[in-house]
Image: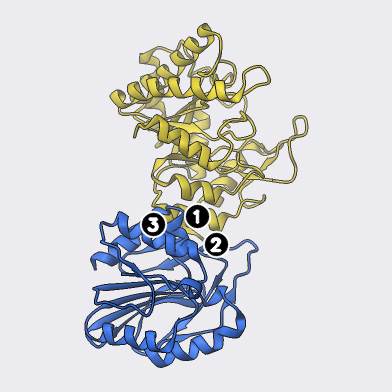
């Protein structure tokens, strides 16, 4: 299930990228907006910049019951004033710390983030990222000193949190991004 | 790159001692009397023996003829000559036990405009691609960018290869030729599995051509982002040949350039920056 947060999604091209790539994976994609939250095996939330507390709690309940949640942070591309509030809500709902967004130094750098699970992939960075951390979480992605992807069991389900946008790479047809997402849907 | 006056065997010995594993052979190059269009098959086989006796392999068969006789030429006779020399590349690649040739496919001039070159090159490469598939030898079309003024951006090159639609036709990617029109790591990302071979050289992007002054330079001395290039190769899973094509030559101690280049390439491969 692809969750379109409307104005709460800070990168519409990320939403478009996930939708196209998930369909390419042969996954039946149902695109809905909050407060709708029917049962699904996988919830995908692209570029999340504004999630309401009730909706986060609803997602938590679904994950604890056995669903997976792929949540890509959009906090690096939203109004700074909104970031602190969202970070608190995400910590309370999922036990995951989304740290202050980092703007990457563009001079002579290696412009890729590394994802390790469910398969290794180098994905182009998107200029800004949100480091994430959580106790008992497996770091499944890194860029230099920053962990940017985590996997954490929650009840019977799984949280996959991304601090560096994957959606824009999917949107441009990046082969490795698409392979990674395909592997995730099959894991 | 074999220093003038050295001869083939001495040159191969230098290449091996400097730390290389292979050599790229250029059909029709005036500095290579041992490999011309009239060189017979038996002589080509002898050439292969000399390369292998030196402990090397042939990475690619290139040619120096495309700039004068291109497969995009208007004159049918010139085009036929170009097709013939590319076919000879395919034949000699098999004799030399390599599975890739380099072609400069398409040459836009003031006389022959872009769209015409595009149509004619597409036709020619499609025909050659069928022969390549039969020979099980890949054609790597080189991105000469500003030099041949054709397929200058990575996306138009990608679209051209889409239209060729033959797994035996891809890109022989030169990371220096891109100059200031783009970024080599982005070309690598876009072309990924279609990359047949990679030419290495560094480039001074802001210099531009000035008479005979080269825009190119030794690895790590120019403006290419080598850590990004290395990472891009890892990203797309490229594990084929890396070939030093050093247009800018040392003025003195010519053999030293071989050692310096091989050492730099080892650092690049190891990712030690």
A40 left or right of B47?
Answer: left
- In which quadrant of the rendered view does residue A77 lie? bottom right
Q: Is residue A42 above or below residue B177?
A: below
A103 left or right of B168?
Answer: right
Which chain is yellow in the picture? B
- Residue A80, percent across and down? 61, 81
Are the numbered discs 3 and 1 placed on the same chain, yes or no?
no
User: Can residue B235 be seen by looking at this rendering?
Assistant: yes
- Residue B153, percent across and down? 57, 40
Kindly identify which residue carries mark 1. Answer: B230
Chain A, hue in figure: blue
Circle 2: element type: loop
Q: Chain of mark 3?
A: A
| Number of numbered discs overlaid on the protein picture | 3
Kindly identify which residue carries mark 2. Answer: A110
Kindly identify which residue carries mark 3. Answer: A176
- In which quadrant of the rendered view does residue A142 lie? bottom left
Neighbour tally class for label 2: few under 14, some 14-19, many 20 plus, Cα within 10 Å: many
- Residue B136, percent across and down? 30, 28
Circle 3: element type: helix
Neighbour tally class for label 3: few under 14, some 14-19, many 20 plus, Cα within 10 Å: many
Q: How far is disc 3 from disc 1 in space, using C-alphas? A: 16 Å
- Residue B218, percent across and down? 64, 45
Are the numbered discs 1 and 2 placed on the same chain, yes or no?
no
Quadrant location of the N terminus of chain A in the rendered image = bottom left
Neighbour tally class for label 1: few under 14, some 14-19, many 20 plus, Cα within 10 Å: some
Tell me which residue sits at (41%, 31%) in the image: B163
Give the residue furthest to the bottom. Answer: A92
Circle 1: element type: helix
Kindly identify which numbered label has been placed on residue B265.
Answer: none
Foreground pick, B229 / B107: B107
């Amino acid at each position: 299930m692809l969750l379109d947060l409307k104005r709460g999604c800070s990168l519409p091209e990320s939403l478009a990228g996930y939708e196209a790539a998930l369909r390419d994976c042969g996954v039946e994609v149902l695109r809905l907006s909050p407060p709708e939250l029917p049962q699904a095996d996988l919830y995908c939330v692209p570029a999340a910049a504004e999630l309401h507390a009730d909706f986060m709690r609803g997602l938590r309940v679904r994950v604890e019951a056995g669903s997976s949640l792929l949540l890509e942070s959009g906090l690096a591309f939203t109004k700074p004033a909104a970031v602190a509030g969202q970070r608190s809500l995400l910590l309370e709902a999922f036990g995951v710390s989304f740290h202050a967004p980092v703007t990457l130094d563009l001079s002579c750098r290696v412009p890729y983030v590394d994802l390790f699970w469910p398969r290794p992939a180098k994905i182009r960075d998107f200029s800004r990222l949100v480091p994430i951390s959580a106790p008992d979480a497996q770091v499944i992605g890194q860029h230099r000193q920053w962990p940017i992807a985590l996997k954490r069991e929650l009840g019977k389900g799984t949280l996959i949190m991304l601090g560096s946008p994957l959606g824009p790479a999917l949107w441009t047809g990046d082969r490795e991004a698409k392979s990674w997402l395909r592997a995730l849907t099959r894991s | 790159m074999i220093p003038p006056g050295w001869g083939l065997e001495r040159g191969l010995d230098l290449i091996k001692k400097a730390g290389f594993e292979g050599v790229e052979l250029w059909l029709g190059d005036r500095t290579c009397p041992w490999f011309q269009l009239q060189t017979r098959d038996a002589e080509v086989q002898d050439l292969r023996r000399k390369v292998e006796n030196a402990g090397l392999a042939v990475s690619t068969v290139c040619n120096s003829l495309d700039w004068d006789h291109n497969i995009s030429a208007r004159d049918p006779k010139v085009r036929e000559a170009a097709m013939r020399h590319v076919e000879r590349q395919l034949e000699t690649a098999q004799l030399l036990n390599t599975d890739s040739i380099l072609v400069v496919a398409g040459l836009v001039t003031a006389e022959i405009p872009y769209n015409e070159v595009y149509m004619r090159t597409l036709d020619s490469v499609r025909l050659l691609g069928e022969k390549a598939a039969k020979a099980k030898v890949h054609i790597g079309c080189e991105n000469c960018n500003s030099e041949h003024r054709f397929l200058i951006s990575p996306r138009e090159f990608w679209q051209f290869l889409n239209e060729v639609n033959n797994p035996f036709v891809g890109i022989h990617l030169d990371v220096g030729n891109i100059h200031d029109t783009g970024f080599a790591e982005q070309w690598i990302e876009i072309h990924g599995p279609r990359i047949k071979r990679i030419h290495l050289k560094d480039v001074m992007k802001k210099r531009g051509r000035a008479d005979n002054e080269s825009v190119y330079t030794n690895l790590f001395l120019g403006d290419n982002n080598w850590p990004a290039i290395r990472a891009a190769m890892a990203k797309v899973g490229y594990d084929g040949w890396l070939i030093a094509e050093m247009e800018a030559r040392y003025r003195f101690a010519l053999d030293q350039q071989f050692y310096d280049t091989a050492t730099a390439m080892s650092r690049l491969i190891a990712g030690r920056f």
